[in-house]
Amino acid sequence: MALPVENSGKSEGAPLGVSLDTEGRTKIEVYVESTGPAVYALWGSNDEYAWRLLEEAFLTLENGGRGHEGFDNAYRWVHVGTANLNDNFIEIVASGAP
């Protein structure tokens, strides 16, 4: 079984987006933190160039704090982002057989 892959990023008072090459792994976990209200969108891509907006409000933090969501995935690349001007953190982890 292949080891999990992950990518993360953080921002200070700025929007944030993080992408991950899942390398064919099908189980995705997303963890987010924000110092204020934030809405995180989810995109998928098979080639890292043509992105599809999958969910506009994938995760919503009404008062800031932390959030988590897991899902099955068929896209090679996933991207999670927020346009909110807070201190933000995003971590994406993919596991499962490629």
Image: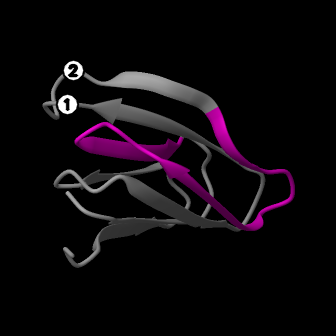
Seen at 41% across and 43% down, the residue is 73
Q: How far apart are marks 2 and 1 (CA)?
A: 7 Å
**Magenta span dominant secondary structure:** strand
24 with respect to 56 (left or right)? left
Which disc number belongs to residue 98? none
Going 30% across and 70% down the picture, which residue do you hit?
A: 6
Q: In which quarter of the image is the C terminus?
A: bottom left
The part of the chain drawn in magenta is: 57-82
Q: What residue type is labelled 1?
A: Asn
Residue 50 is situated, as x and y percent measured from the top left of the image, at 21, 20
Left or right, 82 with reference to 78: right
Q: In this view, does 32 lie above or below 46?
A: below
Quadrant assignment, res 97: bottom left
**Viewport quadrant of the N terminus:** bottom left
- Counting from the top left corner in percent of width and height, residue 15 is at 49, 48
Q: Residue at x 22, y 42 (%)?
A: 76
* Magenta stretch holds residue 25: no
Q: What residue type is labelled 2?
A: Ala
Residues marked 2 and 1 touching at CB (< 8 Å): yes
Question: Of helix, strand and loop, which one carries label 1?
Answer: loop
- Residue 77 highlighted magenta (yes or no): yes
How many numbered callouts? 2
| Crowd tier of the residue under label 2, counting other residues whose Cα lies within 10 Å: few below 14, some 14–19, many 20 or above | few
The residue that disc 2 covers is 50
- Residue 68 quadrant: bottom right
Q: Which residue in the protein does label 1 denote? A: 46
Q: For marks 2 and 1, give the one nearer the viewer.
A: 1
What residue do we see at 19% from left, 74% from top?
A: 2
Q: In this view, does 12 lie above or below 38?
A: below
Residue sitting nearer the eye, 65 or 93: 93
